[in-house]
Image (cartoon, coloured by chain):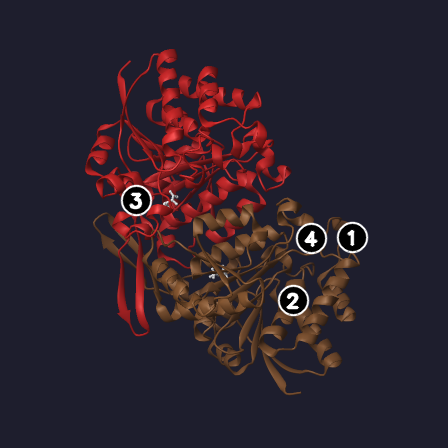
Chain colours: A brown, B red
Amino acid sequence: ADVKKIAVIAGDGIGPEVIAEAEKVLKKTEEIFGYRFETEHGLFGGIAIDETGTPLPQNTLELCKKADAVLLGAVGGPKWDNNPKELRPETGLLGIRKELGLFSNIRPAVIFDCLKDASTLKPEVLEGTDLIVVRELTGGIYFGEKFRREGAHGEEAVDTCVYNVQEIERIARQAFEIARTRSKRLASVDKANVLETSRLWRETVIRISADYPDVELEHILVDNCAMQLLRRPSSFDVIVTENMFGDILSDEAAMLTGSIGMLSSASLGEGAFGLYEPVHGSAPDIAGQGISNPIATVLSVALMFRLTFGYHDAAEAIERAVKEVLDAGHRTGDIAVDKSKAIGTTAMGDLIVNAI
Amino acid sequence: ADVKKIAVIAGDGIGPEVIAEAEKVLKKTEEIFGYRFETEHGLFGGIAIDETGTPLPQNTLELCKKADAVLLGAVGGPKWDNNPKELRPETGLLGIRKELGLFSNIRPAVIFDCLKDASTLKPEVLEGTDLIVVRELTGGIYFGEKFRREGAHGEEAVDTCVYNVQEIERIARQAFEIARTRSKRLASVDKANVLETSRLWRETVIRISADYPDVELEHILVDNCAMQLLRRPSSFDVIVTENMFGDILSDEAAMLTGSIGMLSSASLGEGAFGLYEPVHGSAPDIAGQGISNPIATVLSVALMFRLTFGYHDAAEAIERAVKEVLDAGHRTGDIAVDKSKAIGTTAMGDLIVNAI
Ligand SMILES: CC(C)[C@H](C(=O)O)[C@@H](O)C(=O)O
Ligand SMILES: CC(C)[C@H](C(=O)O)[C@@H](O)C(=O)O
């Protein structure tokens, strides 16, 4: 098989620990399925600030651009929280998304059988919840002009939210395509009763929907969506929305599954290239103790196999291995009911590797 | 007692039905406590569009400006949803907030004992939840410049989010004052890791906090807050945030209580003047059937008594009456477990009036 290049970015906090387990999984799938991966590590986030003076060093960016996919651990931590903007991990995150053209963030929110009770929602409400939030990732208020100025009432701050038709079209098409492979229902979220960008969003989504007559489209206001996710999570299939709304709603959706330590995500551009990362953050409070849960990162590898490489057999093997290990009752501390029986990061990684 | 002028705006959908019950409650408190109210009705929202060609007619605005408080039912409905901006009920809402200087929206999210099970959250998670979202209401992206333009990639839409120091100061002070009367914990919500307005927000809130050393201040990012509301709702006391975030989070908070048909809200400016309204909307699907729940509107009257008039005895009497009626097992359809035993809007209103 041809060699796939994977840029591996461990990042901060528990990033290196969970990435180490994901790399063991990569190696094991090479052995079993005959695929070949070439991994190269890059500095990114807080550690890159400490070692190179910038959160996104030029050679990390080049490493990613040369790669077929990127596997990311997590970035950030209190150490860098009060840094000036250019020296913050988040600035690196926004930079890498923009530089790699990753305009689409795919966030599946699914329930793991063994974690049904971990949610704060009632099991009967959660039953059958399996949704994907498709978040626009390189436009909107995150990337518009920002500045301070003197106004009539003292200092003012300004953020600008901009969307053009092309940006909305491409994310809408991607969401429709994904909906097509699932239950064929798409909810487009906006605030069209107030915002001009939302009105352009809605018009454009409606226009694109003509090419997807088989997909049922619904429009829902962002405030209402924040409520309906709570009230009837299982009624959603694919949700598509702009950057800021997607930030909020994808986190809400993730949390309501109760499985946030288990959720993976993909950030995609045009073509097959993608960046894959667990949804959970760098968890600095438990970093270095070897107790973090590597499953979301391992499942991010499976997602990479599916979406970037088309290695569905290996993806399935990983997903099945994770299920098997969980079904056998093994738990890391974050998902253990009986914390005294919790196993560590490497033990969990080993069990999954053996189950593949 | 001096006569208090109340501008009454019934609005659309179930608005007129629930307002009628609230007016009966007003009358009853006059009789019992000797307070005197002068109510005058104004057109607003969809009905105002139909009858006068604008959602916020000049004489309604003048009526409100002359009044000591405004009692609002609900506005909006599908009939006007596709109207041009100037002919939409929401435009009237934004207009009335701006014109009356209502910069602060107070949204209590509390659990009603008899409705504990109506929430989709587990009762043990919800236990003890009693929070208030203080939402900035006349600034931010809702009110900034909005326009379309031709860009390099086709048509673009732009929304501008602006906050000045004075706008942030006054809402921050109000939130600190409210926190002081409660558990003395304030969570300020922003997206300071990305937005310039959020950085000014956070700086300003920190500066104002020096005047409130007795209030414990925490900063929380909006995406994280959307998660934590779900995970540990009872840990919040007062939440203060900007307009757009407040729109989303206050609705999320309301929904998680399971009591959305029961929640009241206040929109305040400088001084005692305020606009009071139920949190639920105009519910066009059940309008005119006499089955809507008037309790949120009745409780909005109680909130008006507390915050604008300082009539704490009457406020308490209303709140106690509502509790009594609910404890006796009376329910409107929206909150009834056994729908066949549900009572109508006027029956519920009468029961409350009699219990005062
Ligand atoms: C760190 C921050 C800039 C980032 C975002 O809001 O996009 C994070 O919250 C995420 O969702 O990936
Ligand atoms: C109708 C709309 C403009 C309004 C808002 O978002 O402010 C509503 O959602 C609310 O929260 O009162």
Q: How many marks?
A: 4
Please tell me which of labels 4 and 2 falls first in the chain: 4
A217 left or right of B96? right
Disc number for residue B94: 3
Mark 3 and mark 4 on one chain: no
Is disc 3 in contact with disc 1, using a CB cutoff of under 8 Å?
no
Q: What secondary structure is found at the residue carrying circle 3? A: helix
Q: Nearer the viewer, mark 1 or mark 4?
A: 4
How far apart in space, not on screen, are marks 2 and 3 (Cα)?
45 Å
Mark 4 and mark 2 on one chain: yes
Q: Which residue is mark 1?
A: A341
Disc number for residue B161: none
How far apart in space, not on screen, are marks 4 and 2 (Cα)?
16 Å
Q: Which residue is mark 4?
A: A115
A128 left or right of A342? left
Q: Which residue is mark 2?
A: A299
Q: Nearer the viewer, mark 2 or mark 1?
A: 2
Kindly identify the amino acid type of the residue bearing the numbered disc 2: Leu
Q: What secondary structure is found at the residue carrying circle 1? A: helix
Mark 3 Cβ inside 8 Å of ligand 2? yes
Which image quadrant for residue B271? top left
Which image quadrant for residue A266? bottom right
Is disc 3 in contact with disc 4, using a CB cutoff of under 8 Å?
no
Protein chain holding label 2: A
The answer to whether residue B111 shows anywhere in this view is no
A25 left or right of B303? right
